[in-house]
Image: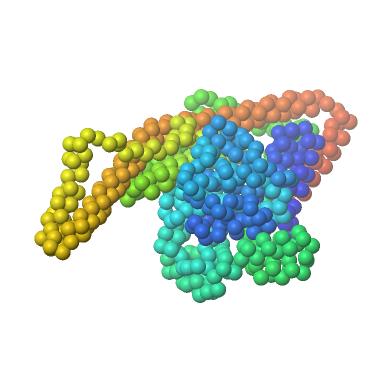
Amino acid sequence: MATDTDIPRLLDEIAAVADELGDAEAAQRARTEAGAVTSHAARVVVVGEKKRGKSSLINALLRRPGLMPVDADIATSVHVTVYAADSEEALVVDDGHPEGVRIALTEIGEYAALDPETMEMHHPEVREVSVGLPDPLLRAGLQLIDTPGVGGLVSGHAALTLAALTLADALLFVVNGSSELTASETAFLVRATERIASVVFVLTQTDKYPKWPSVLAANQALIARHAPQFAGSPWFSVSSRLRLDAARAAAAGRAADAAALEQRSGFGPLAEALTEQIADRTTELRAANAAWVARRVLDKLTADQERRLRSLVKDPDLIASVRAKQAQLNECGRTDAAWRRDLDREFRNLSKQTMQLYQRRMVDLQVTAERWVAEADTATASQIAHDFDAGLRALWTDLESSTRQGAMGIAARIAAELGADGVDALDADVPYPQQLAQARDLQLTEEAPPEGLSATLSRYWPSMSGISMTSMAGHLLFAAINPLALIAVGGAVAAILFKGGKDKAAAARARADVQRHIQAVLSQARFEIPTTLQDAMEALQTEIRDTIADRMTARGRELAAAITDANRHLEESEQILAPQRAATEQALVRLRELGGRVGQLIAGPAGER
């Protein structure tokens, strides 16, 4: 039986036959699909709370000390995608450069993480960082998507990560040996079950925490209790430090030391699982999908050659059957054709469903934001604003995914009903609203300058009243003992009350600033998101309509050419037709042989759908 690795070669053979038969479109389609099979990589989203060792784990997996910024593993809205490439490269995508701007690998931290002192992004306009490496693990069929390290996986950044899981093939969940899973981590996993089925757990820093085996056992019990869907998911215990030490030892030529350190690090079983359980399985699934594309291409080529053979044997019913198909195509080509009405109806339903999703997610985001605002102070205000903006981008990612997947489903159904040979991909973009994409930093209100005496007394009179009462009580109790002690006590209490009043005022200003920021963004989002979604849906619907119409137009030309050939063949002699029949029969034998091999893939384990 054929295996999934045969598909690229089969598609190349199909493309070569299509070229020989003069069908350039079918040949291009087969070659495009062959390239997609070989270039596809399993997307693995790496998640972990701050200080769990997530970034160090990625560095160790790739044997690249310092690739991801370990010391700056702080919340940010930026994900970093690491993929296989022929040479080292890094690109930054921002609002002004959607195609990406090249940076050095040493600059990844500057663009992907917050400044650990100011808690602000160095480049707030950055939306994505991509890193290409000539790495064997990545070449095996993996992409690693590094997500923000956050303090609490229920923040806006967690929502952004959850949205990314919609397009992921697996989740790599990172904890360490210091303590059991937190409540926010288990809550995140419960929410993740709605998005993804494949999870691999990694417990890091085994060299740092000797009691990690008991932590591992406790974590497994917590997973079984709170996220039983993942109770059977594999766990791997590793030391990133030992693996990176092994890489350094190997680079220094100390092979024995490197082998020993590698063994102790525990990374061998993890890398093997990522390759065999995720990369290989994803490639198998992709090959199965490609087999169905190959089947459609072969069916078309075979039908064309069968019709040509009927023409070459002067089948009297051929022209009538072709004209019947032309009439069907002409009917479908009318502006009031049933499929066009179906397309309009399906997109109206998709728009309704997407707007319902938008409204639900906006309510959830607003409720969460109100809770954050109530807890805000000067130390957390900027982080809350960042989390809210990340939550809004996560909301958009969900809407974009829902819109695109819904449109693809509509395209497949309409094309199947028409026999339009499928609509394999949609190119229309669903961009994040431009106005929301513009960087919007939180502006904290500074304390007002000193006021006049009367205003100051009025502002702090409660504190002054407290001072007076303290002084009176102190006078009654201690005046006979030490008047200086009375003054000292009264001054200390006054200072405490005065500072407390200032802190409360600063916290109130911070809450008001965060509230204004959130309301400003929400007001803009309520206008921009529905408008952008509607524009995107119109573009997708137009693309589907035009693609199907183009396919039918091309099919109409083929049918007209078939009628012309049939009429010509009726007048040609047997001497002219015989060699053409032989060539066509040989082509059919070849196409049916290829079809049999594709059929084995579709019927076998790699083709189960």
Residue 410 in the image, given as x and y percentages of width and height: 51, 39
> Based on the displayed image, in which of its 4 quarters is residue 199 positioned?
bottom right
Q: Is residue 553 visible?
A: yes
**In the image: residue 3, left or right of residue 212:** right
Above or below 591: residue 304: above
* Residue lying at the far right of the rendered structure: 575
Q: Quadrant of the C terminus?
A: bottom right
Instruction: Looking at the picture, tell me which residue is in the foreground, 158 or 140.
Output: 158
**Residue 427 point in image, percent of width and height:** 58, 34
Identify the residue at image location x=20%, y=55%: 487
In percent of width and height, residue 85 lies at 71, 46
Figure coloring: rainbow
Is there any visible trace of residue 349 in the rendered image?
no
Write the residue at 60% across / 45% down: 108
- Residue 355: where, in percent of width, then height? 39, 39
For the residue pair 448 and 196, the one nearer the viewer reads as: 448
Q: Residue at x 61, y 56 (%)?
A: 58
Q: Quadrant of residue 55?
A: bottom right
Number of marks in picture: 0
Name above or below for residue 380 compared with residue 342.
Answer: below
* 194 with respect to 101 (left or right): left
Q: Is residue 473 above or below residue 309?
A: below
For the N terminus, give its image quadrant. bottom right
Q: Residue at x 22, y 34 (%)?
A: 452
